[in-house]
Amino acid sequence: MKAVIYARYSSDNQREESITAQVRACTEYAERQGYTVVKVYTDEARSAQTDDRPGFLQMIADIKAKRLVVDVVLVHKLDRFARNRYDSAFYKRELRRAGVRVESVLERLDDSPESVLLESLIEGMSEYYSKNLAREVMKGMKETAFQCKHTGGTPPLGYDVDKERNYIVNEAEAEAVRLIFSMYADGYSYNRIIDELNKRGLKTKTGRPFGKNSIHDILRNKKYAGYFTFNRSARKSPDGKRNNHASKPPEEIIEIPGGIPAIVTEELFRKAQARLERNRRLAQAASGSYRAREAYLLSGLIYCGKCDSRMVGTSGSYHTRVSREYRRRCYYHCNNAWRTKQCSARKVNKEEIEAYVIERLEEEVFSTRAIRKLASRLYKQYIRELKDTEGENKYLAQEIRTVEQQITNVVEAITIGGQIKTLVEQLKSLEMRKAILEARLLEWRHRHEQSTFSLENIAAYLKAQRELLRSKDPVQIKQVLERFIEKVVVNPESIEITFKVTVDTHGGGGGSRTPVRKKDQPSLSERSLCFAFRPQAAHRQATLRLSLCVSLEGPQGERLPEYPY
Ligand SMILES: [Zn+2]
């Protein structure tokens, strides 16, 4: 087996091992596994959150182009491979296509389903904590921002910046700002405002005539009402590119009322905002752009119970019988039924099934009770795995003592005049062995002190995920669904949801991850529209180390409503 090593060191995390230590640990691991290391790729001093990793990308490119034929990519820890879960999943898939798998020295994962689950949990958490770190850094930046100083660039129209970088009003320019706000609040169109500005000979900060965009930007700028704002735009999109139009989540935007001199009154500003918002909604409704952003939250997770094929998002217009108007609806439809008509499964209403799945997830995974239970199970599992490695600690400590003794012996042999050349060679190799053992011992300690897996942190992680689920942002919601739901199967008379939450078990041997779907097991509850855990099935599934698969089944006779074509 051939392996490459990938090591990365980011200067923003003081606690992590140096590149040398990572490579050493990987080399030692490769020796133990019998792998031949053919190449080492490294990236240094770059933030873990960006994709800016030339060494890493070079490695991917080399493997994909078959310039390098290997079986394994070795990393010290999984978060060295990528901090972002999607990024990581993406590159792992790329590698898998080339027949290469990723192995981590510390996490000891293989390709079994349990490992895939644990991996997804570990990755989810390390992404979460990486975001927390970014928040801490932001705090530091806020300290400077609180002084309400100009942070660089050209100040906005109406303001100048003095020597201490404080904002001061430029009265000549402020006239244009006041005119724009009062005309807009009075209901004038952008065109009429531009005409008036031109008539008075007023220009933008760069001396050009006003356009609609510049007026829009001015109207939205809270500085004019005296608010100092900082960190408003999200600078980078997930792929690391600049994006000046996206806004940061509100809690990360710093806003200090009265932080700079106001040019328009609070009341006038609010009036203008109200009109902007009204117009925005009108424009949106007119263009129907909200439809384009419709997200199929369950795509990739939802399957047809009849033929096992994926269900895909579709939409269609229909004609109401009474009012004779066209309306639009979205569905999930069995791919087989939709494209080749080989399956007779009916489509299901998108809104209804999404709402139902989210409701179940809230209840089974994110309710306060469920979080408490899951966190404690996960933690116990984690502790058990740590205990399994205690033997390793003793072995390493023992080995280090042995090597130290051997070193002492060699040194003694040198002093009493032995074969210097041979002895020095021996000494070198013993020192090397000692260094490797010490690196492994460090690894072991690191693993034990890893604070991310405390009971509180697991619960906090789950709660944070729950907040994302409750956000109005479809992208966030979809990510949470992909993280915690393995599969939604739509049967003619029931819906089956398999959650993937990593938990420990009631003991027992191995098991299959396929949800149990025995129809003769009655559901716990007879109430209609009520789905329940089935403890028998849960126990059987819980024989897995890390996954609890629960089939949720509708009471008999329940049918999904029918939908018009
Ligand atoms: Zn089907």
Image (cartoon, grey):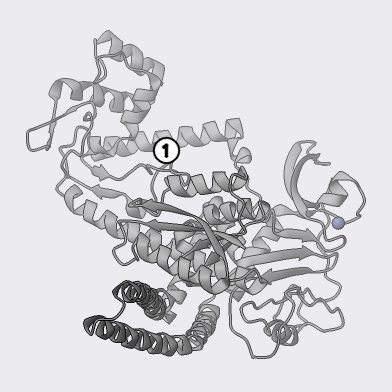
The residue located at (87%, 62%) in the rendering is: 306
The residue located at (59%, 40%) in the rendering is: 290
Tag 1's secondary structure? Answer: loop
- Residue 509 shows in this picture: yes
Residue 253 vs residue 223, the one in the foreground: 253
Above or below residue 462? Residue 395 is: below
Q: Amino acid at mark 1?
A: Asn
Asked which quadrant contains residue 307, the reply is bottom right
Residue 408 vs residue 152, the one in the foreground: 408
Q: Position of residue 346 (x, y in %)?
A: 85, 55
Locate residue 139 relative to residue 86 in the image: left or right.
left
Q: Position of residue 244 (x, y in %)?
A: 39, 36
Q: Quadrant of the C terminus?
A: top right
Q: Which residue corresponds to mark 1?
A: 243
Q: Residue furthest left?
A: 163
Locate residue 118 relative to residue 184 in the image: left or right.
right
Whether the residue carrying mark 1 lies under 8 Å from ligand 1 is answered with no
Image quadrant, ligand 1 = bottom right
Q: How dense is the environment of label 1, judged by Cα within 10 Å: few (below 14), some, or many (20 and up)?
A: few
Locate residue 25 relative to residue 2 in the image: left or right.
left
Above or below residue 450? Residue 72 is: above
The residue located at (65%, 78%) in the rendering is: 548
Q: Position of residue 44 (x, y in %)?
A: 35, 52
